[in-house]
Amino acid sequence: MKLVLATRNKGKIAEIKKLVSDLSQVELVSLDDFQNLPDIAETGKTFKENALIKAKEIASFTGHWALADDSGLVVDYLQGAPGVYSARFSGEQATDEQNNAKLLALLKDVPWEKRQAKFVCVIAICNPKGQCYTLEGECKGYIALEPKGTYGFGYDPVFFVPAYGKTMAELEPEIKNQISHRAMALKQLKPLLRQMLKRSEGQTYNIH
């Protein structure tokens, strides 16, 4: 079974390859293995919709199963913002620092108990015929009063994890990779792939 990872992120590719290394029937490839890929507009209003859009498009174009993910930050006080706009919260070419600054400004003087937030990651796996599966992971916490830490990226410096008493950016990468929203979603990936392999026995359109 060939599975196309809808990403060019080397770290993400390596992480997934390591996770499924013992599933010899699964051959992982990435977008770098294909040419003339279409531009995919992430027009969904939810992480799930965007992940499905990407996975369906790549599966249709390549003729293989495809895996895509979408993730971001959800803040209760802001009615779910920045949500699917997490990467471009303060503009299309926004930096992490600009996005964090805008978030903290919007939460200025908001009491701690109302600063609840969560990171969300949705993974979608689709085949060329449009059959799809989705997996979701979450990591709950609070928006800190100020940025702290040098690890990670994005909103990590302002995302406080109560269980560790630190922001995500203060946690060692090994710890973050165990508790993150993406880690929670990826933990469900191997069992799903095993189920898919069993169900796909006898089918020829996605077996290689």
Image (cartoon, rainbow, N blue to C red):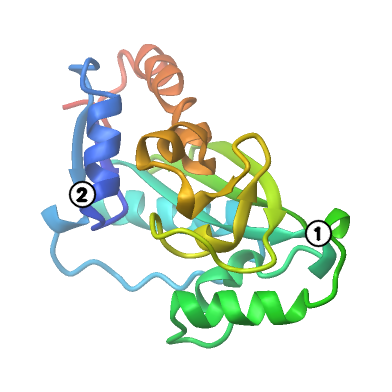
Q: Position of residue 151 (x, y in %)?
A: 38, 55
Pick the residue in front: 55 or 122. Answer: 122
Where 66 sits versus 105, above or below? Answer: above
Query: Circle 2 — which element?
Result: strand
Residue 56 seen from this side: yes
Query: Circle 1 — which element?
Result: helix
Pick the residue in front: 104 or 131. Answer: 104
At x 12% / y 53%, what residue is drawn? 33
Pick the residue in front: 201 or 21. Answer: 21
Local packing at callout 2 (Cα closer than 10 Å; few below 14, some 14-19, many 20+) is: some
Where 72 sits versus 163, above or below? Answer: below
The quadrant holding residue 195 is top left
**For mark 1, what is the residue?**
76
Give the left or right position of residue 69, taking residue 208 as reference.
right
Pick the residue in front: 134 or 177. Answer: 177
Q: The disc labelled 1 sits on which kind of residue? A: Asp
Q: Position of residue 201 (x, y in %)?
A: 32, 13
Where 136 sits versus 68, above or below? Answer: above
Q: Position of residue 160 (x, y in %)?
A: 63, 51
The quadrant holding residue 54 is bottom left
At x 52% / y 33%, what residue is drawn? 184
User: Spatial distance from mark 1 to mark 2, Cα to Cα?
Assistant: 35 Å
Q: Quadrant of the C terminus?
A: top left
Q: Quadrant of the N terminus?
A: top left
Q: The disc labelled 2 sits on which kind of residue? A: Ser
Give the left or right position of residue 200, taking residue 107 as reference.
left
Q: Of tags 1 and 2, which is closer to the observer?
A: 1
At x 52% / y 50%, what residue is drawn? 168
Local packing at callout 1 (Cα closer than 10 Å; few below 14, some 14-19, many 20+) is: some
At x 63% / y 69%, what residue is drawn? 146
